Amino acid sequence: MSAVGGRFKRFPHHMVVFLAPATIIYTLFMVYPLLDSIRLSLYTTDGTGAFHFAGLTNYIAIMTDPLWAGPFWNALKNNFIFFTMHMLVQNPIGIMLAALLSLPKLAGRTTYRTLIFMPTMLSVVIIGFIWQLILSPLWGVSETLLDHIGLVDLFQPWLGQEATALVTLSLISVWQFVGIPMMLIYAAMLNIPEDLTEGAIIDGANHWEIFWHIKLPLILPTIAMVSILTFVANFNAFDLIYSVKGALAGPDFSTDIMGTFFYRTFFGFQLQLGNPTMGATVATMMFGVILVGVLFYLFVLQRKLRRYAL
Amino acid sequence: MPKTRQAISSMGIHAILFSYMVLALWPIFLTIINSFKTRKAIFRDPMGLPGLDTFSLKGFNKVLLRSDFELYFMNSITVTVATLVLVLLLGAMAAWALSEYKFKGNKWLGLYLAIGIMIPIRLGSVSLLQLIVNMNLANTLTALVLVYIAQSLPLAIFILSEFMQQIPNDLKEAARCDGVSEYTIFFKVILPLTRPAIATVGVFTLVPVWNDLWFPLILAPSNETQTITLGVQQFIGQYVTDWNAVLASLTLAIVPILIIYILLSRHLIRGITAGAVK
């Protein structure tokens, strides 16, 4: 064996053996396709399937050509609404649940934690279909429930209406993924030294004051991390819209987000043919949006918050 | 007085947590109970448990008869298990090399492998499909496994190398003094010690792979290679109006994940909480 009698006496074959398989698979199936997609976005195809270099033509088309620009800006806008709903609803609920779960001497903590996290584990496709059934006027489950609490007049086919479909889908996604901020923030709260909170209790502070003045400032870095995870996941989302609304993201594209727009551009739908180079362009735009978010997190949020954390 | 106030506030806390728990579980519960009911009972009394006169397995019969559900299920298991084993093995090997050996470019290689934690592999789909077609792997489970390994490795390597850095040096040095090869140290000493971290990495790998719709849809949509997630999606698309069949197929897709979750939730939660501490 090569390493007998000391690590560096001969060429360290074992290091290559340990590192090569993972690095090769990762490079070939992840890094190369990402970079090659960016390259492809600078080309156009013709009827024969040949590729021609076209510079930024695709980007100009997607942002200004009426055929592309309408759907593109619509999908981007919808995606921001989708993300905003998560930030406004999912993360505050997650923080609240985490704050309650981390209170001292809470009975049944593990049970609550485990069961509330359960929907997060299921496939988005399954969750999408389940909520489609529950919200369906045909089945009437939601109507009956609203009737019990005297709010039956509120019932509408939320998933079917242009004005409400996107918000409803966002809330379904919030319902499924609230477990992630809950868990991460809960873990951060457990990490807060007990001296801090106990000292405050002796000084006469209640749980509410402790939360606002001690815990919340200390978990800000975790909230920033949760936000960037949400951002990346939301701008990469596809499964939920596709399984509930199909590739056309109806009604009238009101639930179209970048993921479904990418799919349609790449594979085509109905009369429009699939266009790989335009698909690569949409993917590169998504990559750009995600990269801006990640860099903002790394260089602005994390640096600012680190000062607080100390 | 403070005691009563404490009791009231503790009741309030339990009320909130319990209500949220019901909200989280009720849709899943509703789906499962209704999949065991007759069509009539599904509509007349959706909230009722299946009783003697309303019990029916018609939906399950239809799903098993009209779709290749067993095949999809086996495909999902094959893909998930193959991915899991290879990610754990290759990930642990790379993590060990990165955390143990000092060599030029160690930091850069670690950073390079970590980029994939944040950047979704989906964005490379156009080229990835071309690559898979050129390799003659379109509509094969192998294609899915390769892509899922690439997708899962970054996080696996990250978690495992954090863990391996904490393994005490004495153990390794003792083995090295005995003149044991680096391979033996890794497989006989290190790998068994990483078992707790391996469980965590396992869940983080398994769940997204099992639940994925995107790659089965674009890389392996043929009937022979459909995974359970894609199979259910296609089946429901076809039988939208058959409520028994729809509910039964959803239940069949939910139950395996619920069982795995209940078995592994301890590791998963420990993994998340330990990871967030850093």
Image: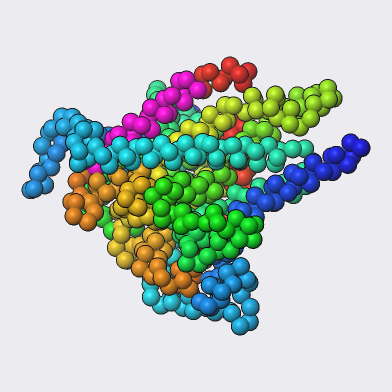
Where residue B151 appears, x then y in whole percent?
Answer: 40, 43
Residue A176 vs residue A48: left or right? right
Depth check, front residue: B255 or B151: B255
- The x and y percentages for residue B270 are 63, 43
The image's colour scheme reads rainbow
In the shown orientation, is residue B58 left or right of residue B8? left
Give the image location of residue A244, x and y in percent: 41, 56
Residue B83 in sight: no
Question: Residue placed farthest to the left in the image?
Answer: A48
Picture residue at 55% right of the left edge, 56% below the top? A153
How many numbered circles does the render carry? 0
Is B8 placed above or below B260 here? Answer: above
- Residue A91, percent from left and from top: 56, 37
Say whether residue B51 is left or right of residue A252: right
Q: Residue at x 74, y 44 (%)?
A: B13
**Region rendered in magenta:** A277-301
Q: Quadrant of residue B169?
A: top right
Whether the magenta-drawn stretch holds residue A138 is answered as no
